[in-house]
Amino acid sequence: HAVVATVEKPNVVGWFDYVCRAMELNQYSIAAAQPGLAIERIRELQVFVPPEAIQQAIATFLDEKTSTIDEVIRKKERLLELLAEQRAALIHRAVTKGLDPGVEMRDSGVEWIQEYPARWVLKRLKFACVLQRGFDLPTDQRSDGQIPIMAGGGVSGFHDTAMVGPPGVVTGRYGTIGEVHLVEVPFWPLNTSLYVREFWGNSERFICYLLSMLPLKMFSGKSAVPGVDRNDLHTLMVAVPPRPEQDAIVKHLHKRLALVSTAGEALQQQITYLHEYRQALITAAVTGKLEIPSTEAPDAP
């Protein structure tokens, strides 16, 4: 039967906490509008209950080991954040300043751009690309297929019909704001997204990078549900280089960002392994599969 910890000794309560973690109780949750645990099922679960001294030893051991693991995870997650900042800085620098540090610059009068290369053209976004709202597609009207359904956060499912041909660029209109996705196959953009209907001869990949740097979230506070209006976005000023320079910027960013992505993937894999090791350590300790150093004082000679 389920064990209820009513004692006040923190180590024993801590042991019970680790037992619950080892049992991974979320697997017994009920699928509903308000997810919850199946209490009757939980009550029937059985656990090994060692003597109190062993409970204390297990809790003390796991407190020390998991805190060390958690600190390593925090440091690696911070490195991931720094990589994301580096990625954003690389893109912002390239799409607002270009690749030539010695080029003549001109003041844009726009806060997010500041200075831009004099040979570039400052224009409103609608003259660089035209954004269009996506299309409704209720879940019960979707058919099995290989056409990706694009929402603001990326692929949200598949369908048998495409509404837009490749290459495409999609960003969030409601819900997920600020993410931008390049789509290289036919796709269906959902009505919660905006897609680029017209590139005006610009590089699709350059426009993708450009949109990812726009201050889209400045328009998202107009309602309780975060969202942006394409008409607002079309008024934003952007600096657009000649097409050959766009292609050079895209090539440069592709190479530099690949290195950042590789480092990020390696870090994420390490974090995943650490979480798995943490869980395995807890399970092994509370099920008696791991020898725990005793916290009891040795007997007097």
Image: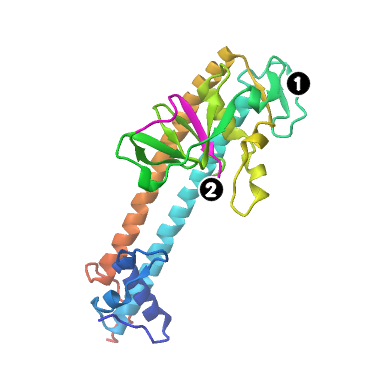
**Three-letter amino acid code of the residue under disc 1:** Arg
Instruction: Tell me residue 185's x, y (percent).
Output: 39, 27
- Main SS of the magenta segment? loop
Q: Is residue 178 visible?
A: yes
Q: Is residue 110 above or below residue 266?
A: above
Is 128 situated left or right of 5 in this image? right
Span colored in magenta:
161-176
Instruction: Tell me residue 291's x, y (percent).
Output: 24, 69
In reply to whether residue 49 is colored magenta, the answer given is no
Give me the residue at 69% from left, 18% from top. Answer: 121
Give me the residue at 39% from left, 79% from top. Answer: 13
Is 243 situated left or right of 69 in this image? right
Give me the residue at 36% from left, 50% from top. Answer: 272
Q: Is residue 277 above or below residue 189?
A: below
Image label count: 2
Residue in front for this viewpoint, 181 or 48: 181
Q: Label 1 to label 2, Cα distance in Å? A: 36 Å
Instruction: Tell me residue 233's x, y (percent).
Output: 65, 34
Mark 1 or 2, closer to the camera: 2
The tag earlier along the polypeptide, 1 or 2, is 1
In reply to whether residue 162 is colored magenta, the answer given is yes
Instruction: Tell me residue 153's x, y (percent).
Output: 47, 42
Residue in front for this viewpoint, 73 or 235: 235
Task: Say which mark, if any, is on residue 106.
Answer: 1
Task: Say which mark, if any, is on residue 173.
Answer: none
